[in-house]
Image (tube, rainbow, N blue to C red):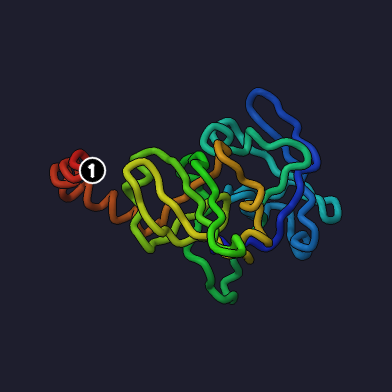
Amino acid sequence: MFTGIVEYVGRIESVDSSPDLTRFRIDVGPVAEGVKLGDSVAISGCCLTVTAIDGPRLDFEAIRETLETTRLAKLRAGDGVNIERAMAATARFDGHIVQGHVDGQGHVRRLERKGPGGNEVELHVECAAALAQQLVDKGSVTIDGVSLTVVEVLPDGFHVALIPHTLEVTSLSDLSQGDVVNLEVDVLGKYVKQYLERVLPGLVQSASESN
């Protein structure tokens, strides 16, 4: 599993696509240290397996289902991606529990800079109602692999606040209106939702319809 604390912004060096499989070569810089074949690495929030190593360059493969669920199919050479290695069992736990299993895609409604120095930044994201229903104010959400706190949930989206440090060390600073982002909701919320749907299906459906 992961924590949503980005270690490095890597750069896509090449993308080799076929009908059923796409291979990515990514320069992950210092994050390559200690990485072995078969290790799991989160690429902008999507858990992929290392298939080849060439110094700081790592190769990954994504099948059609992954490409359809995430924004990986839109990546091109030169794009920046957020990199995080799988969490070590002995490491400190920052962020929140992130599986690297993208639940869906969102679209950037707007990225607003506020305050005298423009240091107060709000990122507004549009997403499917089914995803928005699994979010709560002050809860956690992962955007392109970055663990963030939800400021406000809307019927068709949500918004988060970004501090200058987050913009400096992640690829979120490159976002603009209309861009697609990978979203993963809090795994605890997913389990609660599924449990309630099984135990109280009528109640859960009525609550969803009223929203």
Task: Please report the residue visible at 20 percent of the width from the left and 38 percent of the height from the top.
Answer: 209
Left or right position of 94 against 157:
right
Count numbered badges in the picture: 1
Split into 4 quadrants, where in the image is the C terminus? top left
Place of residue 59 in the rendered image (x, y in percent of width and height, measured from the top left)? 75, 45
Q: Residue lying at the far top in this picture: please name it.
A: 19
The answer to whether 204 is drawn above or below residue 99 in the figure is: above
Q: Residue lying at the far right in this picture: please name it.
A: 55
Place of residue 24 in the rendered image (x, y in percent of width and height, measured from the top left)? 73, 40
Q: Residue lying at the far front in this picture: please name it.
A: 116
Q: Is residue 86 visible?
A: no
Q: Is residue 73 visible?
A: yes
Task: Please report the residue visible at 65 percent of the width from the left and 23 percent of the height from the top.
Answer: 19
Which SS class for mark 1? loop
Left or right position of 28 against 103:
right
Task: Please report the residue visible at 34 percent of the width from the left and 40 percent of the height from the top.
Answer: 129
Choose between 49 and 29: the one closer to the eye.
29
Left or right position of 49 against 110:
right
**Amino acid at pointer 1:** Asn
Place of residue 61 in the rendered image (x, y in percent of width and height, measured from the top left)? 68, 40
Task: Please report the residue visible at 82 percent of the width from the left and 55 percent of the height from the top.
Answer: 56
Place of residue 111 in the rendered image (x, y in percent of width and height, measured from the top left)? 55, 48
Left or right position of 61 against 127:
right
Residue identifier under label 1: 211
